[in-house]
Image (cartoon, rainbow, N blue to C red):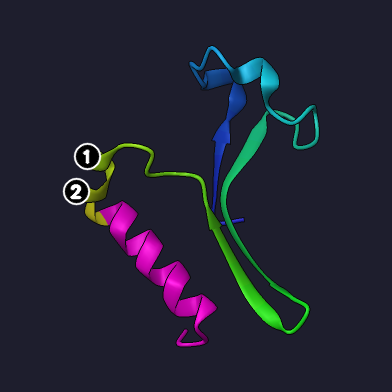
Amino acid sequence: MLLVTDLAQLDDPDKATYPGNRFGDSLPLSWYQEFDGGREYYLALGHNKVDYSNPRLCAQILGGILWAMGEK
């Protein structure tokens, strides 16, 4: 996992629909893995246009893409 959030601190009216107690109070937001000969990168951030003006988010996305391409 690259990024996690503390579910207890999350203010979301849909929180009850999140996946059970699988990760305890932690909810993965970004991870990577090698699977079946390929590379997978997942990111659950960037739901709003304004998010993409954040250089940290853009760096996270670029790093994930480069890793999935085998460049990192």
Q: Which residues are magenta?
A: 56-72
Tell whether position 68 is magenta.
yes
State the mark number for residue 36: none
Q: Position of residue 16 (x, y in %)?
A: 68, 16
**Helix, strand or loop status at disc 2:** helix
Horizontally, is 11 left or right of 36 in the view? left
Identity of the residue furthest to the top in this view: 13
Residue drawn where x is 22% and y is 39% of the image: 50
Q: Are marks 1 and 2 in contact (CB under 8 Å)?
A: yes
Where is mark 2, residue-wise? 53
Tell me which residue sits at (32%, 63%) in the image.
59
Judge whether 36 appears above or below 59 on screen: below
* Residue 71 position within the rendered picture, expressed as x and y whole percent measured from the top left: 45, 87
Q: Distance between the Cα atoms at labels 1 and 2?
A: 6 Å
Quadrant in which the N terminus appears: bottom right
In magenta stretch: residue 59: yes
Determine crowd level at label 1: few under 14, some 14-19, many 20+ residues with C-alpha closer than 10 A. few
Q: What amino acid is at disc 1?
A: Val
The residue tagged 1 is 50
Which three-letter amino acid code belongs to the residue tagged 2?
Ser
Q: Nearer the viewer, residue 3 or 17?
A: 17
Q: Residues within 10 Å of mark 2 (few under 14, many from 20)?
A: few
Tell me where residue 15 sits by quadrant: top right
Residue 65 in the image, given as x and y percentages of width and height: 44, 72
Residue located at (50% from left, 77% from top): 67
